[in-house]
Image (cartoon, helix red, strand yellow):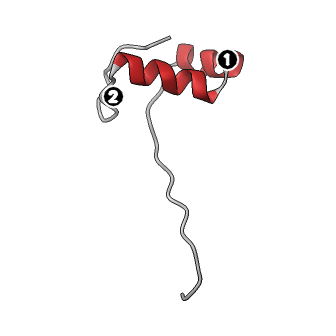
Amino acid sequence: MPGGHARILWTLPVTTAEIEFRRRHGHEALEQLFDEAEIIPTDPFRASVA
């Protein structure tokens, strides 16, 4: 559709500890932990960063 737009959502498996960390510290802080830990986003068995 001309002039339309698309929204692309990316899913990432997260642990319960990471969800709680995000609630306390925010999305940006959790992303920073992911970056620092150099996680492999497609690994469903990765260790929690929080």
Say which residue label 1 marks: 25
| 32 to the left or right of 21 | left
Q: Please say if 35 is above or below 42.
A: above
Indicate the amino acid at tag 1: His
Q: Position of residue 48 (x, y in %)?
A: 42, 14
**Quarter containing the N terminus:** bottom right
Q: Residue at x 61, y 15 (%)?
A: 21
Q: Which mark is residue 47?
A: none
Report crowding for label 2: few under 14, some 14 to 19, many 20 or more residues within 10 A (C-alpha): few
Q: How many marks?
A: 2
Q: Residue at x 55, y 88 (%)?
A: 2
Q: Please tell me in which quadrant of the rendered image residue 39 appears.
A: top left
Q: Position of residue 42 (x, y in %)?
A: 30, 35
In this view, the mark in front (1 or 2): 1
Indicate the amino acid at tag 2: Pro
Q: Please tell me in which quadrant of the rendered image residue 5 appears.
A: bottom right
Residue farthest to the bottom, as pictured: 2
Q: Position of residue 11 (x, y in %)?
A: 46, 43
Mark 1 or mark 2: whose residue is earlier in sequence:
1
Q: Please say if 49 is above or below 1.
A: above
Tell me the SS state at disc 1: helix
Say which residue label 2 marks: 44
44 and 37: which is toward the camera:
37
Q: Are marks 1 and 2 in contact (CB under 8 Å)?
A: no
Report crowding for label 1: few under 14, some 14 to 19, many 20 or more residues within 10 A (C-alpha): few
Q: Please say if 7 is above or below 41.
A: below
Q: CA distance from mark 1 to mark 2?
A: 23 Å
Tell me the SS state at disc 2: loop
Q: Residue at x 33, y 28 (%)?
A: 44
